[in-house]
């Protein structure tokens, strides 16, 4: 009998599962062309946020919250978060 690695709650770690058990990867879903909401978040990216400061190319800094010891968080123009606030001057 093969001994499996178990975590504290009794579950089996994914790395210890034998691939011959028939587990298959989940296929990626294709985007729905009729989805009216698929481009809704395009204007809610870091590049249009009032807290985004561009530094070099596509890299910038998010100044939404106070900086940590490592400084302001580095973000790309195409990133997004739930704290987005639209800046009318960046549209």
Image: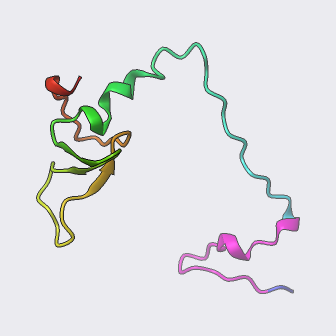
Residue at 23% from the left image edge and 22% from the top image edge: 91
Residue at 17% from the left image edge and 72% from the top image edge: 69
Residue at 63% from the left image edge and 80% from the top image edge: 6
Q: Nearer the viewer, residue 85 or 76?
A: 76
Q: Is residue 42 left or right of residue 87?
A: right
Q: Is residue 26 left or right of residue 75?
A: right
Q: Nearer the viewer, residue 52 or 33?
A: 52
- The residue segment tinted magenta is 3-20
Based on the picture, tell me whether residue 19 belongs to the magenta stretch.
yes
Question: Which is the main secondary structure of the residues drawn in magenta?
Answer: loop
Judging from the image, the colouring scheme is rainbow
Q: How many marks?
A: 0
Q: Is residue 3 left or right of residue 87?
A: right
Q: Position of residue 64 (x, y in %)?
A: 15, 48
Q: Quick check: 31 above or below 66?
A: above
Based on the picture, tell me whether residue 49 belongs to the magenta stretch.
no
Q: Nearer the viewer, residue 14 or 7?
A: 14
Q: Quick check: 3 above or below 17?
A: below
Residue located farthest toward the left when viewing the structure as drawn: 66
Q: Is residue 2 left or right of residue 67?
A: right
Q: Position of residue 7 (x, y in %)?
A: 57, 79
In which quadrant of the rendered image does the N terminus lie?
bottom right
Q: Position of residue 16 (x, y in %)?
A: 72, 77
Residue at 67% from the left image edge and 69% from the top image edge: 14
Q: Position of residue 81 (x, y in %)?
A: 31, 43
Residue located farthest toward the front when viewing the structure as drawn: 56
The quarter of the displayed image where residue 10 is located: bottom right
Q: Quick check: 72 above or below 89?
A: below
């Amino acid at each position: 009998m093969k001994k499996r690695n178990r975590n504290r709650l009794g579950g089996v770690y994914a790395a210890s599962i034998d691939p011959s058990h028939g587990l298959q990867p989940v296929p990626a879903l294709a985007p729905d062309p009729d989805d009216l909401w698929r481009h809704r978040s395009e204007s809610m990216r870091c590049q249009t946020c009032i807290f985004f400061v561009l530094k070099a190319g596509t890299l910038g800094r998010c100044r939404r919250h106070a900086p940590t010891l490592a400084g302001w968080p580095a973000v790309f123009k195409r990133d997004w978060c739930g704290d987005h606030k639209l800046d009318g001057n960046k549209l």
